[in-house]
Amino acid sequence: MTPEIQRLQQQLWRAPQDPALHYELGRCYLALKQAELAQRSFAQALQLAPGHPQILMQLGNTASQRGDEELAADYFKQSLQQDNQQADVHFNLANSLRKLGLNSLAIQHFQQALALDPADAETHNNVGNAYRETGQLDLAVAAYAQALKQNPQLLHAKVHWIHQKQHMADWQGIDHAIDEVRTALKQRPQAQIPPFAFLAMPGTSSAEQLQCASVWAQQHYGHIQPLPVPAARRQDQKIRLAYISSDFRQHPLAYLVTDVIAAHDRSRFEVSLYSQARDDGSSEREAFMSAADHWIEIAALNDAAVAAHIRAADIDYLIDLTGFTQNSRSGVAAYRPARCHINWLGYPGSMGEVNGNSLFDVILVDETVQQAQFSERTIPLPCYQPNNAQRPQAEAGTRAQHGLPERGFVFCSFNQSFKITADVFACWMRILQQVPDSVLWLQACNPWATSHLKQAAQLAGVQPERLIFAPRTSVSQHIARQQHADLMLDTSPYNAHTTASDALWQGIPLLTVAGETFPARVSASLLKHIGLAECICDDWAQLEKQAIALANAPAALQALQIKVKQQAKMLFDPLTFCQQLEQVYRQLLQ
């Protein structure tokens, strides 16, 4: 108990009907993240001062802290009914609406907040996030720039600005901004740097990525009091697994891990899926539900409630398949609800430390990605990435149907645009210049990236028409059309991950360079596992030479394609992968 709380309680003993004292006490509890006590104090204050807009706002803040965004939004709306000129309440309501997926409505309230307080940097940043969620990347970048104009020290706005510029393939100014973020990580202990965006920044080291994750984890989960150590498990019970994810839906995760989860030996394992994903009505979601013994929806539960459920279910292993990616629920692990907490697959890196201890006990890796730095104990599998036995299938169509020339070599890279750096793109352009009549087939991620990449090609002396942009389509059609590609070129420092497996499934050779960090070593991991080390180049100069040589040697390319087709089958064997994974689970218990 703080001195301030003691003082307020003494004053309340003398004046129990004073709403201001209850209000101030609630604020103290809220600052300490003691939401239940805060709620009680604010409710008492509201009883004594009905309809008070600031008390209603604080009840909304308390509900938000407890993870109940619908109730929070309701309180904020009640507060605005009393007084519509509160910039902070419009801001808070917009944040709750964004968490509820109502981004268009959130933007309206962010704009109302800015009309009342145009200099608020956080509001500019957060409206940028809402623009990003609605695909308005140009408005998002402009909003982040405005946030930085109001507060040049607002580091997370700088990180968002960099990451969305990367999505737009607009590389102007980002190298200097990345240097500033790296400097801040060293010099400012409280720097807020979203770890996933940091992974994709060229030049960041594995040690820096671990530090970034630890700072972020400490900021978000450092206040959490872990549950008591669980009771000793009964030796005769099945091993209880809980997989937690925001991506049990139509998402790349579905094509990696669904068959592995379904393959668990039910005589020895019991499998629960804790799903944060909204129901998208997809067959992928249905397959996940069928693969589980227990399916638990957690979108409406806060982290503490999910942790309590996991503890009550006597779970042995909590396996987080999302990590620090979108809609993360990694705060659940900070409560230590299971006997062992495992970071795997969703986030290609360490989740860092909280209060001097690793947030997760274990990370599942392989000998290639294991060379990065981790706070977790590393447990190597033969290959860290699983895959379903099949990819969705469809007719491939003709080259002409996909905008490809009837003749000529087709290089491809279907990675998201944020992974394409200026240096990688320059390498690709040099390759095109050395291979006449060749084209580069890319994913049409957004109109800004398409425009900027065409401009960059022109500046490099390559006709923009030699870049072919594949429109978004169904997963089955996307995978099928890749049959028309001859060779895939990787990105760095964030490689192809699921995209690499998609290409190998179709027998498309992939050239990569193994970097220092986890996300820069994934393609090398897959290629080593299937015996294609010759596709892992020492550097980008070698990759350039090898790509040009293969494009000019049809027999060598065909031999490599046949080898890929034969040996990639090892990647698509979920039964064997599941047996290897279960062996790890059994050994960890011992």
Image: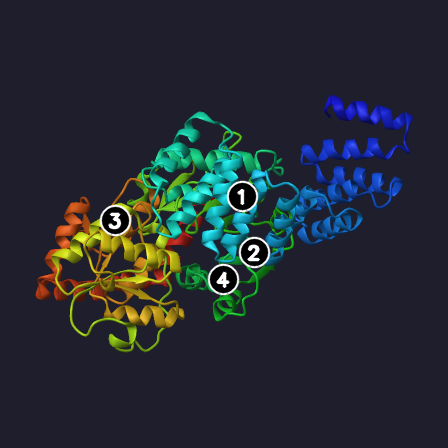
First along the sequence among labels 1 and 2: 1
Q: Position of residue 115 (x, y in %)?
A: 64, 46
Q: Position of residue 190 (x, y in %)?
A: 51, 30
Q: Measure the alpha-carbon separation of dots 4 and 2.
A: 24 Å
Q: Position of residue 69 (x, y in %)?
A: 67, 51
Query: How many other residues sit within 10 Å of disc 2, few (<14), some (14-19) or many (≥20)?
Result: many
To which quarter of the image does residue 61 belong? top right
* Amino acid carrying mark 1 in the image: Asn
Dot 4 lies on which element?
loop
First along the sequence among labels 1 and 4: 1
Residue that numbered label 2 is attached to: 276
* Amino acid carrying mark 3 in the image: Val
Residue 424 is marked as 3
Dot 2 lies on which element?
loop
* Amino acid carrying mark 2 in the image: Gln
Dot 3 lies on which element?
helix
Residue that numbered label 4 is attached to: 266
